[in-house]
Image: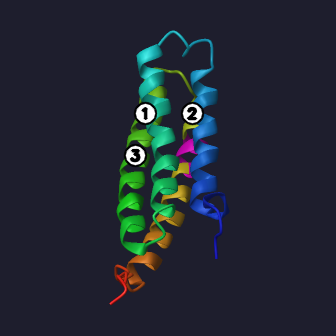
Amino acid sequence: MARRVQDLECWRLADELRGEVYAICALDRVKPWRRFCEGFTEASGSVCRNITEGFGRYDAGPLVQFFKYALASLDEVEDYLRECRTRQFIDADRLAKDLNLAEHARATMLNSKRYHESKPRQKPRRTSRGT
């Protein structure tokens, strides 16, 4: 059982992908494309942040919803990666490596999402008011 979000394999893979995105945007041929890099890094960070926010809700329902947000952001990252290849920022081998990392992150996230979808939802706690 994960005690911290960093214990989740899907988060670790998403964080590794985020590092790849930052490395691409640090390339001299990519740096001048600031708006492109801002969108690309924001999308990659959003994957990790959504997993983190869902994990911090301590309930399966919100966690599943935030996995959905993270998966959508991952789709966006994959599109940016393909655009990097189109713009000739990266070669075909790097694209394949990074898309494989993204797919691995997606698979682990989907497995976690399915697991949490199967868990019973927590009922809201009732507080007694001394009655």
Looking at the image, do the residues carrying marks 1 and 2 touch, with CB atoms under 8 Å apart?
A: yes
Looking at the image, is mark 1 or mark 2 earlier in the sequence? 2
Of 79 and 129, nearer the camera is: 129
Work out whether 59 lies above or below 74: below
State the residue position of label 1. Answer: 80
Which residue is drawn at the image coordinates 54% and 16% (left, top)? 30
Q: Is residue 99 magenta?
A: yes
Image point (45%, 64%), residue name:
57
Q: Quadrant of the C terminus?
A: bottom left
Q: Position of residue 52 (x, y in %)?
A: 52, 54
N-terminal label among 3 and 1: 3
Residue that carries the numbered disc 3 in the rendered image: 73
Residue topped by disc 2? 21
State the image coordinates of residue 60 (x, y, percent, origin top left): 42, 74
**Magenta residues (range):** 96-101
Query: Which amino acid, mark 1?
Result: Tyr
